[in-house]
């Protein structure tokens, strides 16, 4: 077994695809409209689906926003330099919600950014 993808429901698919591709540097791997169900699925990631886990963006055509609840935490990405990643993301229009620094009660350097729908993405510094 292996993890295939994580699904996020998004209110504006084009805005979300732009964030994940232009701000975080992922690729749009595939996209499919389902007119009978009134939804679209878009799969994005850094590598092909056969090589690793990706994110599935689900856009239900008649739902512009979602409540996040308190169960989902975040998506984590490895970066070589968290402070530089924050600067790059900010320069591309992304929102940094926690600057790079050691995690509470630890020494791992982390930062957090937020996607257009408010989902948190943790940047974990790994050389």
Image (cartoon, rainbow, N blue to C red):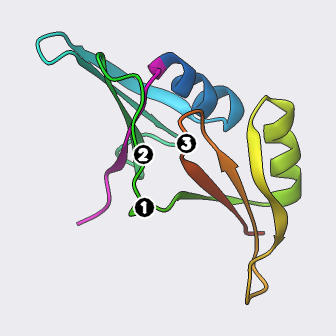
Res 125 visible:
yes
Q: Position of residue 37 (x, y in %)?
A: 14, 18
Horizontal side of 30 relative to 2 (left or right) equals right
Stretch in magenta: 1-13
Q: Which of 65 and 89 is in front in this view?
A: 65
> How would you rate the neighbour count of disc 2 (Cα within 10 Å): few for under 14, some for 14-19, many for 20 or more?
many
Work out how far the residue at label 2 is from the one at label 3, CA to CA, in angstroms: 8 Å
**Tally of numbered tags:** 3
Horizontal side of 71 relative to 78 (left or right) equals left
Image quadrant for the N terminus?
bottom left
As for residue 93 lying within the magenta part, the answer is no
**Image: 68 above or below 29:** below
**Image: 66 above or below 60:** below
Horizontal side of 68 relative to 95 (left or right) equals left
The label shown at residue 122 is: none
Q: What element carries label 1?
A: loop
> Which residue is under mark 3?
46
Q: Quadrant of residue 72?
A: bottom left
Q: What element carries label 3?
A: loop
As for residue 5 lying within the magenta part, the answer is yes
């Amino acid at each position: 077994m292996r993890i295939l993808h994580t699904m996020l429901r998004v209110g504006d698919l084009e805005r979300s695809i732009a964030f994940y591709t232009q701000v975080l540097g992922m690729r749009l791997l595939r996209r499919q409209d389902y007119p009978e169900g009134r939804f679209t699925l878009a799969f994005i990631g850094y590598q092909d689906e056969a090589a690793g886990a990706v994110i599935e963006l689900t856009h239900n055509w008649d739902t512009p926003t979602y409540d996040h609840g308190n169960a989902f935490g975040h998506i984590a990405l490895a970066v070589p330099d968290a402070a530089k990643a924050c600067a790059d993301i900010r320069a591309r229009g992304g929102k940094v919600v926690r600057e790079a620094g050691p995690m509470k009660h630890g020494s791992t350097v982390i930062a957090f950014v937020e996607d257009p729908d408010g989902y948190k993405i943790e940047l974990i510094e790994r050389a």
